[in-house]
Amino acid sequence: DVKLLCTCMVAARLSQSTDARVVDLLDSVEKSIERHNGQSCFGGYLGLAIFVQSVARKIRSHGSDPSEDWCREQARRCICILVKSLNNCTLTDDESILELASCIETGKSSDTLPLPSELTAKDGAAQKLIGVII
């Protein structure tokens, strides 16, 4: 848990210079979250949120810097991980959440996204839900 948080913070620091190692670090965090099925990954979720905030700050502060596309891509990727983790907290996969993740991943917007159906959290998913929402 702490390792994932630290990994994301290192990635956030390296992202200031669009370091190629950032992608490897985010891969590591994503795989760890998937491998543990999201259990005990609060640090990973918080770290991804910190990373997105850090990258978003860079995009705003540099205007039309050529690295902005890379920053947006990494931010979208982290948000997708969080949204997919939210879907993993429910008893059944909700297509609307998966469609939202797909729109975020591709960078395309849609005015026709369906609303989630009645969502029921899995047993023991309360901490995970809190982590994802934060």
Image: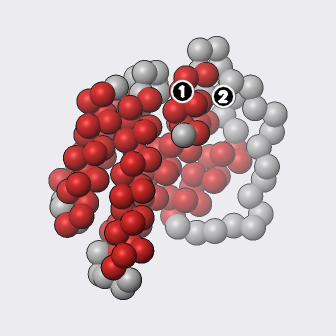
Residue picked out by circle 1? 128
Helix, strand or loop status at disc 1: helix
Residue picked out by circle 2? 90
Helix, strand or loop status at disc 2: loop
User: Measuring 26% from the left and 37% from the top, which residue is drawn there?
Assistant: 6
Front residue of this view, candidates 85 and 95? 85
* Residue 126 on image: x %, y %: 61, 22
Q: Is residue 104 above or below residue 115?
A: below
Q: Quadrant of residue 17?
A: bottom left
Amino acid type assigned to the residue bearing label 1 in the image: Lys
User: Measuring 28% from the left and 53% from the top, which residue is drawn there?
Assistant: 12
* Residue 4 on image: x %, y %: 31, 33
* Residue 3 on image: x %, y %: 26, 30
Quadrant location, the C terminus: top right
* Residue 21 on image: x %, y %: 18, 53
Q: Earlier in the sequence, mark 2 or mark 1?
A: 2
In this rendering, would 119 be left or right of 25?
A: right
